[in-house]
Amino acid sequence: MAKTYEETEEEYLKTEKNSKAFLRLIREIFRDRGTTAKVVISVIITALAGTFYPLALGLSIDGILSRNEFYFVFFALIFLFLFFVVFLSNRLRTVQTTKLAQQKVKDLRDRAFLSLQEAHINFFSKVKTGYLISRITNDAENLSEFLTFQLPQVVSGIVTVVFSVVIMSILNFSLTLYALLIIPVLLLFTFSLQGRVMRNYLATRKTIAAITGSMSETINAFRAIKAYSAEESFEASFSKLNKNNFSANMKAAKLSSLFGSVVRIIEAFGIVFVIYEGARELTAGLISIGILVSFILYVQEFFDPVTQLSQLYTSYQSAMVGVSRIYSIIDVEGEALDGNKGNQPSFRDSIEFKNVSFSYGSALALKNVNIKISRGDRIGIVGHTGAGKTTFSNLLLGFYSPSEGEILLDGQNLKKYDPASYRHIIAPVLQDMFLFRGTVIENISFSNPLLTRDEIISMAREFGLIEIFEGLPYGFDTDVGELGSNLSDGQKQAVSLMRAFVRRPEILLMDEPTSQVDPFTESIIIEALKRYVADRTLVLITHRFSMISLVDRIIVIDHGNVIQEGSFESLNVKGTEFYNLYQTYSGIE
Amino acid sequence: MKLSFKGLVSIFEPLLFSFRFTGNRKRLLYIIFVAALVASVTRLLVPVYIGQSITALEQGKSSLVGFFLVLIITVSVITAVSQFFINYLSQKLAQWYAFNLRTVLLDRLLRKKGTFMDSRTSGDLLSRSTMDIEASRNFILNTASQLISTILLIVIALYLLISINPIFALFFLAAVPLLVRIGMVFQRKQRTHWRKIRMHYGTMNERLQENIVGQRVVRGYNGMQSEFSRFSGTTSDYYDEYMEVAQLRGFYNNLMPFIVGAAATAVILYGGYIDLLTGSTVGGLVAAVNIFIMVSMPVSFLGRIIVFSENARAGIDRIKEVIDSGDEETYDNNGIVPQNYDLVFRDVSFYRGTREVLRSINLRIGFGEKIAITGRLGSGKSTLVSLISRIYDPSSGVITIGGVSITDVPLVTLRKIVALVPQGSNILSGTIFENIAFGRDVSLDEVQKACKTAQIADFIESLEQKYNTLVGERGITLSGGQKQRLLVARALVGKPKILILDDATSSVDPETELAMLNSISTSLNGVTLIIVSHRPSVLRFSERKVRLENGKITEEEQLPRNYVDADNNTKSVATGDE
């Protein structure tokens, strides 16, 4: 059973095996040495300026107390100058860290996308679409926030704390110890709560995701809910999710409010310790009032970076879970073998299936199949649903390789060629007529970007399909909508057919081309096909017979076996499997 | 926007809106207000006491220091306790608001008429019911936990500064509006870029989805390179927008501390000279600088809260369009229950906007009849059958069942009599049983029977968990035909008198479909079957065919009852379609 995103994440967080991915990420990020150098310099400058400004304030106050006007004004101006330096260096840091982070995020997304494009088609049957999308969008987004906002701020803050501690120790070691007294308490306190904070956080995310999911389903199932008067039961189940979310949030709120309050008390103790020890040393004449004022500022400056550090730990873990998952997509093996890259095949004579068997898992989908497609052949492959027809088309397109036997292209084993370049030979019109968001013309020219608009339109006219496109609201410029939702199935079919035509392939492969098309559109499409395949090779896979007149030779597949082969007339004899098929399906669509 | 009085008041508008949903709990605001008042005073007393202990040290009265240290701890504990209540109760108020608003919104949505839902995309409705609620909830939270405290903090800081030195207060009065203003400008500028980032993010999502779902097409046509450059173009746009945000953040986020630093410097210089000239103590000066630094953070955030209010108001307007728009069905249990189930359309027309989707339909469907409705895409078939379940109501004309106008039949009763399997509906995440029971009180036995009739029982029985198998997002993946048969089973389990299949079996293969239809007519004795389809196999099963064209019935034909021996009549029926 597939686990949800949150469940997997929780598991990862428990196991913590992400340090490898983190190191790989850091190595990759630091490859941009120029930007890295700017980041390092700006962090150091910020830290130095941040360290010295409380000191400047203290010295300026000492100037007042010692009635030394120059001292006082000089250090007051230094104080202002240091703020200005922080302004400049932090500005540089913000821009440069964003650059480093966003460069990397873009790079990871692009690489993951490319990896999916090249992955073996098998990969997609194992992993759900939603999972992949969420890796490349959500996970990368988490990483983006972590790298852009959280990490740089905390790193810079901690560097400042370290610098401050050094300066303080030089100024007055014992007072520094008092100022640092609270840090272990603060760290211990925040880290001890981390586990619970994280669990609460995951619970709020999980419950809000459930609410969004339920809302989305309810909106989409609106008609069905009405049709069965299921309003109240939907409200009841939603109410449960809503309550869960409420209590998860309140639980988290209780803890985080408590956390904030306790930190404030710890902070007060920090100040008190410094003043207490400072007063003692002041009376002993060891320090000036100015130094004491500086120390009070220092101790307050410690808080944000230290509490942020503990929060960073949570987001570090969840970001790294994301990173390791993105890397696992990037590292997916491609379908092209190293040996066959760059072998450009051509189709002169024939494609032959020789003793080909294929299985997806345990059951054989094709058994010892022998089929020869010669140049100029027009072949129909027929059979019931599940007979092995689509497997045949997957093998022909090189999406899969035979488990046994071989496929020969002009006598050469198909494995020798790069599948991408081999596919130049075949244009598929597949069962799911897939359209991209965009216009009709964009969807057509996708398969052959070199063609001009006029050439495409004239091809549509040549094959008699123009009527279908001109009937659309904006003709060829009609927006097809999400997955082609603005078009009817027949119109989608016409688009995918044109897409194949403009490619001018050696072989046209049609896999169940006319399911669910209204008869009027279908007759236009058949007419177009007749003209197109007159002097080309056609492989038509179907379990319906409206297009059977397009082919010269029919191959009947049943349970993965070729059981009959011949012309329509020779096969359509009472008692044969073909005859039964024809009787069941003829006239259907 | 000028910071006018009206503008200031409108910042609190979302809070007023929230009162509709927080009921008694709006009283929490009083507690929050009192706690915020206490917290602001005690927080600001810390720098005052720091200053006074410095003064005490300066004057050599170190015995007094201990007293101030105790005070610092005491006021900090009071701040901490008040702050706990502010944070916790603000969350409670905001969460309670979101909880109730979600409940109300879902309730209103489910009572909308079909026409309301048609006029909006599901994505739009979803974003109203999730993101808009989140935005306003966030603002309620910010108002309660920060806005109130910050305003009180400013007022009290001002009072304390005046009491230390009125000139310090003047510096403060110059710095605060400047910080608020900069915060607002920053947030507004940033907002447009964030919107673009979200847009690019959406496009990225779409491209990714298309390429995963359509990867066979992409590969089949070797579109990998061009698709990659399209995707990479989107990630570049996203990157560019982020860099714009970085420039803004780099400038404004760091400008604000610099202004605080400048104001603090002014305080030091001015206060220092006064102290030099008058020889007074530096305690007041130290206190003032500490107050400036303490107040600067919340004040810098104030400007952004004001802009959040603009977002929240926009979101609330969009929420109001859903909850206050009317367009709802009336649920009344009083009405007439039909005694027989003959269905009659009398002069029924239906307009969608100005477009006439159905034109004076007159149709009589006797109880127990098997009727096929055909016609091209957009001819009005789905609308026609949706009227029977009152997903829509006719613009004119009457539909009656057993002589009773369906508007006089209680909705729940009507929808028990009529079962509509809508076109393109989907299964929900949950178990198979839950999907079929669909909130109704039915036994496993009834569900099994319905599945048998829908020709899906064998498949379900073959699963390890059988009827408890999870389907949908987190469950097993079903084929199109399997989904459709489940949806038919969902309709059958309610034992309807009139069953409508709106293109609901298009992915089921014709043999199974025929078996299903035959099984339905025997198991639901005498059920009326209305099937929207252009499949010849359906026509072979039906007794009558009605053809729609442009919302009009153009053809009505009695069909030979030939589904018993399909072989002989195949041709004649098939050619009868077109």
Image: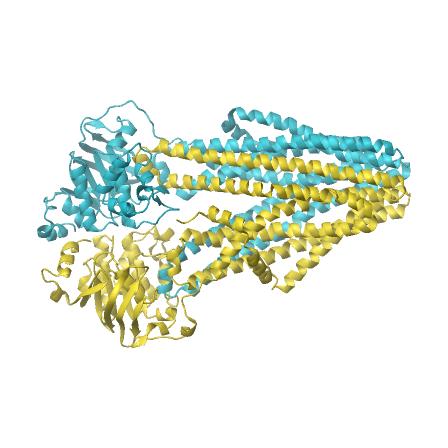
Chain colours: A yellow, B cyan
Q: Quadrant of residue A497?
A: bottom left
Q: Quadrant of residue A444?
A: bottom left
Q: Is residue A367 left or right of residue A57?
A: left
Q: Would residue A114 be visible to someone looking at this image?
A: yes
Closest to the observer: A40 or A254? A254
Residue B351 appears at what percent x and percent y? 29, 38
Q: Position of residue A151 (x, y in %)?
A: 62, 52
Residue A295: image location, x then y, percent: 79, 44
Q: Is residue B265 visible?
A: no
Residue A564 found in image quarter? bottom left
Q: In front here: B295 or B245?
A: B295
Query: Number of marks in the image?
Result: 0
Q: Position of residue B565 (x, y in %)?
A: 9, 48
Left or right of B182 on screen, residue A14:
left
Image height of A344 relative to B390, above or below = below
